[in-house]
Image (cartoon, grey):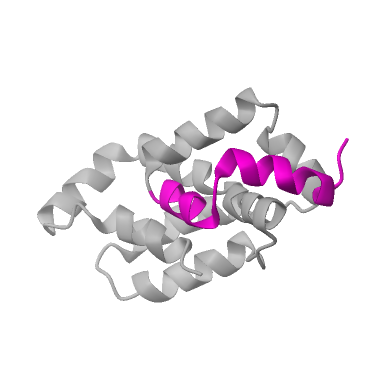
C-alpha cells in the first residue's frame, strides 16, 4: 500500500486539477464518471479511506487532500455550513434529513435518500418553483 505522499502524483494526474475536482463534484453525472474512472484505476473509496485513516471525511475531501494537499472539512462541518443556508427554508425538514444522511454516509447517502424519497421531495420543490435547490444545497456543502 502506498503512503499518502506516494499516492499524490497518481491521483493528481487522474483528477487533473483542483478546479476540475470542484467542478466535477458539483455535477452528479461528472462526479459519478470521475469516481468510476478512479475505481477503474484501482482507487476505490474504501482503499482511499484506509490510506487517509479517517472515517469522518467525504470522498471529495479525501481526494482533495490526497491529490492536492487541501485542508479538509469533516462531513459534520460541511453539513453545518449547508444547514446555515437551509434552516430558514420552508423545506428545511427535508434538507435536515438529507444533511443527516450526508454526515453519516457522505454524498452517496444523500443520493440514496433522494431516490427513496423522490415522491415526497419532488412535489415540494415543484410547488415552491425551486427545482434548483438540490444544486444549491450541494454548492453549500462543498463551498470552501
Q: As drawn, is 94 to the left or to the right of 127?
A: right
Q: Is residue 112 magenta?
A: no
Judge whether 116 appears above or below 19 on screen: above
In the rendered view, would you say 61 is above or below 27?
A: below
* Towards the viewer: 23 or 26: 23
* Image location of residue 70, percent across then percent down: 65, 64
Residue in the picture at 55% in, 35% down: 35
> Relative to residue 41, is residue 94 drawn left or right?
left
Question: Which residue is located at x 64 percent, y 47 percent?
Answer: 12
Name the residue located 53 percent from the left edge and 53 percent from the top edge.
102
- On screen, residue 43 above or below 6: above
- Viewport quadrant of the N terminus: top right
Say whether residue 9 is magenta. yes
- Give me the residue at 57% from left, 51% from top: 60
- Numbered marks: total: 0
Residue found at the very far top of the displayed protein: 40
Q: Main secondary structure of the magenta part?
A: helix
Which residues fall within the magenta stretch?
Answer: 1-26
Viewer-nearest residue: 64 or 86 = 64
> Residue 94 falls in which quadrant of the image?
bottom left
Image check: 7 left or right of 98? right
Residue 6: image location, x then y, percent = 83, 45
Residue 135: give x, y in percent of width and height: 31, 54
Amino acid at each position: 500500500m502506498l503512503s499518502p505522499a506516494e499516492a499524490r502524483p497518481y491521483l493528481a494526474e487522474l483528477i487533473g486539477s483542483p478546479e476540475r475536482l470542484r467542478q466535477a463534484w458539483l455535477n452528479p453525472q461528472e462526479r459519478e464518471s470521475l469516481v468510476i474512472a478512479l475505481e477503474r484505476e484501482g482507487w476505490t473509496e474504501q482503499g482511499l479511506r484506509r490510506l487517509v485513516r479517517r472515517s469522518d471525511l467525504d470522498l471529495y475531501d479525501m481526494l482533495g487532500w490526497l491529490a492536492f494537499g487541501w485542508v479538509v472539512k469533516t462531513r459534520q462541518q460541511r453539513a453545518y455550513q449547508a444547514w446555515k443556508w437551509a434552516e430558514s427554508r420552508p423545506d428545511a425538514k427535508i434538507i435536515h434529513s438529507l444533511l443527516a444522511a450526508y454526515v453519516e454516509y457522505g454524498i452517496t447517502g444523500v443520493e440514496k435518500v433522494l431516490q427513496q424519497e423522490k415522491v415526497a421531495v419532488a412535489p415540494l420543490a415543484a410547488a415552491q418553483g425551486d427545482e434548483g435547490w438540490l444544486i444549491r444545497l450541494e454548492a453549500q456543502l462543498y463551498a470552501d
